[in-house]
Image: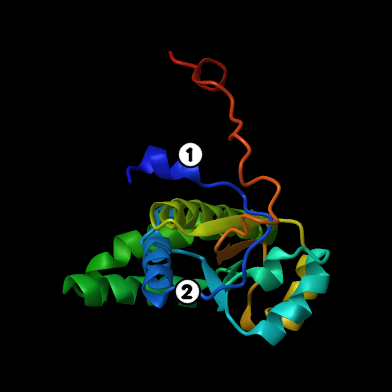
Amino acid sequence: MNIIDALNWRYATKRMTGEKLPQEKVETILDALRLSASSMGLQPYNVLVIENPELKKQLQSAAYNQPQIVESSHLLVFAPWSEINESHVNSYINNIAKTRGETPESLDGFRKMILDSVNAMNPEQKFNWAARQAYIALGTALSAAAIERIDATPMEGFNSEEFDKILNLKEKGLKSVALMALGFRDTANDTLVKKKKVRRCKDELFIRL
């Protein structure tokens, strides 16, 4: 299946069967998410991968009782770092050095550039920037799921503060911004399953200069 066929096939699934996904499919989607683009490569977020049915039940009430929360096989919670500090940057630089067989000192210029960029932002700007990086990863994961023929529902309709409490995210230095439910569409109960995809036409969407 090519990417256009995959994206035409996918939709924001409203009802799922609860069936467990093949683990290799899940890992492929997570690998794609891990490889997603990120500004400066920093990836200033974590993604919680929730399979526990009891935990999903606790979270459902904080997501306005949407059925995908409990009917999904896996629920992904995208959580940017609530603060970006020098230790985060140093860890990233050390990872680059280890991966590429370089010394951390040889990357001092890049390290300074990242720190200067981050330190120029106030806390709110830092978090908003981190959240945008998480959304890039969410988009990558949606496309990967479609290629793997796995249904995925991006979700912003939830109480972030309640999610953070249930998942102890504040203690982890994280704050939830988006969810993605992964599973199989329930063709008998999802009213959208046979409806045509609606998107703006190219002439309306694109401004070619």
Residues 39 and 121: in front is: 39
Q: For residue 100, what is the image quadrant?
A: bottom left
Q: Are marks 1 and 2 in contact (CB under 8 Å)?
A: no
Q: Residues within 10 Å of mark 2 (few under 14, many from 20)?
A: some
Q: Residue at x 43, y 70 (%)?
A: 26
| Left or right of 25 in this view: 127 | right
Query: Is any atom of residue 120 visible in this view?
Result: no
Q: Position of residue 115 (x, y in %)?
A: 46, 62
Q: Is residue 203 above or below residue 136?
A: above
Q: Is residue 204 above or below residue 71?
A: above
Residues 44 and 103: in front is: 44
| The C terminus: image quadrant | top left
Q: Residue at x 42, y 64 (%)?
A: 29
| Left or right of 72 in this view: 138 | left
Q: Residue at x 36, y 73 (%)?
A: 24
Report the coloring of the rendering: rainbow
Residue furthest out toward the left: 101
Amino acid under label 2?
His
Query: Is any atom of residue 201 visible in this view?
Result: yes
Q: Secondary structure at mark 1?
A: helix
Q: Residue at x 58, y 58 (%)?
A: 185
Q: Position of residue 127 (x, y in %)?
A: 63, 60
Q: Is residue 141 above or below residue 58?
A: above
Residue furthest out toward the front: 188
Q: Which mark is residue 8?
A: 1
Q: Position of residue 88 (x, y in %)?
A: 47, 74
Amino acid under label 1?
Asn
Q: Position of residue 130 (x, y in %)?
A: 57, 59
Q: Which residue is mark 2?
A: 88
Sequence order check, earlier mark of 1 and 2? 1
